Amino acid sequence: MAKKGNRVQVILECTEQKGSGVPGMSRYITTKNKRNTTERIELKKYNPYMKKVTVHKEIK
């Protein structure tokens, strides 16, 4: 049977890299519970292009 859940896949994209002029784009895929977390999520993740930890926001 298929699961009936509220979890959806979301894409996280780096916010600091757009204005810096560094080529490439750091993106991560994760899941969230859309019932408990209705707003867009922000997580600190490693950006391999900038070689540091940056804030990644959910895009749609």
Image: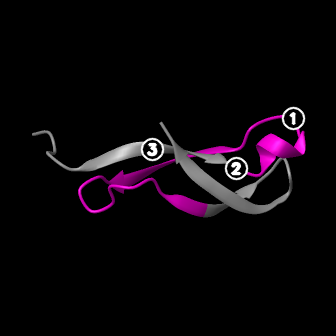
Q: Amino acid at mark 2?
A: Thr
Q: Which residue is mark 3?
A: 10
- Residue at the spot x=39%, y=55% of the render? 39
The quadrant where residue 42 appears: bottom right
Q: Residues within 10 Å of mark 3 (few under 14, many from 20)?
A: some
Position of residue 51 measured from the top left corner of the image (x, y, whole percent): 86, 57
- Marker disc for residue 23: 1
Left/right of residue 34 with respect to residue 17 in the rendered view:
left
Among numbered discs 2 and 3, the one appearing first in the sequence: 3
Task: Point out the stretch of residues depicted in magenta.
Answer: 16-43
Position of residue 19 measured from the top left corner of the image (x, y, whole percent): 83, 43
Among numbered discs 2 and 1, the one appearing first in the sequence: 2
Among numbered discs 3 and 1, the one appearing first in the sequence: 3
C-alpha separation, residue under disc 2 versus residue under disc 1? 13 Å
Tell me the element at label 2: loop
Q: Which residue is mark 2?
A: 15
Of the two numbered discs 2 and 1 in the rendering, the one whose residue sits closer to the viewer? 2
Tell me the element at label 3: strand
Q: Amino acid at mark 1?
A: Pro
